[in-house]
Image (spheres, rainbow, N blue to C red):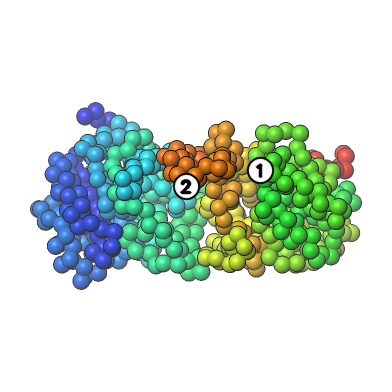
Amino acid sequence: MISKGRQMRSITFAIPVAPEDPTIDPARLSQLIEFVAGQEAVTRILVAYERHEQLASIKEMIPVPQKIEFIRVDGWISASAMTRILERSDDGLLLALAGLDLRFERNCIDKFIEAAAISGAGLVYSDHRQRMGAKVIECPAIGYQEGCIRDTFNFGPLVLISTRAAKEAFSKYGHPSGDLRWHGFYDLRLKLSIDNRFMHVAEALYVRNEAPVQRSRSRAMTMRDVFYAVDRGAHAFEIEAENVATAHLRRIGAYVKAGSAPPPPQELVEGFPVMASIIIPTRNRDRTLREAIDSALVQSTSFTYNIIIVDDHSTDSTEEIIRAASRCSDRIIHMVPSRNDLGIGGMWNEAIYSKHCGLYAVQLDSDDVFAHEQALEMLINEFSEGSIKPAMDGLVTPRYAMVLGSYLCVDADLAEIPSGLDQPPELSRENVRNKLLCVDGPSAPRAFYVPVLRRFGFPNVSFGEDYAIALRIAREYDVGRVFEPVYLVRRWDENTTRSLSYGRLKGVRMKELMPDAANKRELWSRLEPIVGPLTIASRNHGNTYKDYLRTIEIQARREINRRRTQPDDCRNGIARAIPGPTAGKSYV
């Protein structure tokens, strides 16, 4: 074995066991323990359990060779559990994060050790396979960037940690607080990532035999549910994650305070045709578009607004629906881009840079609706934390450059479904600019102050375009929140997030490709082996892009903070010309 960097001569394997878990197969668990115990490099196996009465059952399930030690923990992977396990670990810690029904490839552990030795990495993880009955699905992981700071980053069920690197990280950046119930590993790997490389082995080194189980967010966390959040209504989990993430941003110099530069003042409101524009990008949404338009038309406001619908060359009856609605209301602006290669972000750019766009732009997806007639008024008023009416005289500078709303989850018929109200408590007004770096995306709906929005524009992508602009705005400006639900988000079989956006398959739903006369069930079963890997590739592509956005944002914020510590730095920023409908006008 080639050796370079940190040499791991002895490995500790740590695994949680809960006998009452119905997915545990005692025979397979026993085989796993026997295999690991037979590896020369493994000198100790730590079997963690949560309750004293479990121990007898655990000893019946698995062999008890000399290498095995049983340790009681207060929860898998709490801070106290991580600390105890590291104290009892040898050179390396092979940690089972979740999923006990694993089958290692013959040289799995050797390859983990070799990757750590060659790269000098503080943490090593790999691809794996998922067995579902007779099917085997490839589950590739994605590379680790500095921006992989969300607590949901998927390493897979197995990681190898350098014990020395982990202890050095704790010594340098502080031991975790003992009251971390769910985020002991999260705290450890964030501290470990500051000075250490994380190595991704692009090879499936083990198989997870357990079929995936749907877990409700309302369930309590167990040892197996490591990366599954509790009910959003139970704020303790989210608050704990936020505290860990915020402390990390402070450590690496990327934390930003609330109260940075306000948006440019509304010096010439008359330069915009209306106060607000509702932006609806759409393509082939004839099943839901009419409801979206109707919910926009009935908004009761104290200001003028229009509705800009950007139709990306629909091939169904979407265009006819827009034209019919336009005949009934002069508020509707129908735009068809000259290009046919636009993502959702590109469609937004068509709207916000047009002469029709108002001073504020508000999101409305073509398969969602506003929750009530006061939604638009509430979103716009939030910009000035009060009535927007004085702004009509050009007297108000908005407090925020972006406002995030809250929504209810509904089905295709607009009936409320779990998880119901999505009101992320971690996206508070006080810390939203930092927490945006650690979530999968901003809440909805999103409203923007257009003079700032035009500075940056949206990236021409269809996944993560909202996250990209939210991060960019939050780098420099405060973000407002509306916590009352003002939006209904459909969860149905034609959501954009359920269509493939990978490579040339822009927004393709595979079921649309099936001939009407075909036996769709049979055809779909034949397509599954193709669709499954494409879906995973698309999801990984999207997550990699979002991690890239976070990486760039962390680097930018760190540089801003560095410059602010320099005495000659102009802390209030540099005057910028803001493109707008009024030629030659600049905002400072």
Q: Is residue 395 left or right of residue 80?
A: right
Q: Which residue is mark 2?
A: 521
Position of the N terminus by quadrant: top left
Q: Amino acid at mark 1?
A: Ile
Residue 67 visible in the snapshot = yes
- Residue at 36% x, 47% y is 156
Q: Is residue 190 above or below residue 108?
A: below
Seen from this angle, which residue lies furthest bottom? 53
Closest to the observer: 124 or 257?
A: 124
Seen from this angle, which residue lies furthest top? 2
Q: Amino acid at mark 2?
A: Arg
Could you tell which of marks 2 and 1 lies nearer the N-terminus?
1
Marker disc for residue 539: none
Q: Is residue 550 left or right of residue 454?
A: left
Q: Secondary structure at mark 2?
A: helix
- Residue at 57% x, 56% y is 492
Label 2 – label 1 distance at C-alpha: 31 Å
Task: Determine contact: label 2, label 1, CB under 8 Å.
Answer: no
Closest to the observer: 178 or 539?
A: 539
Marker disc for residue 344: 1
Q: Residue 453 appears at what percent x and percent y?
A: 72, 46
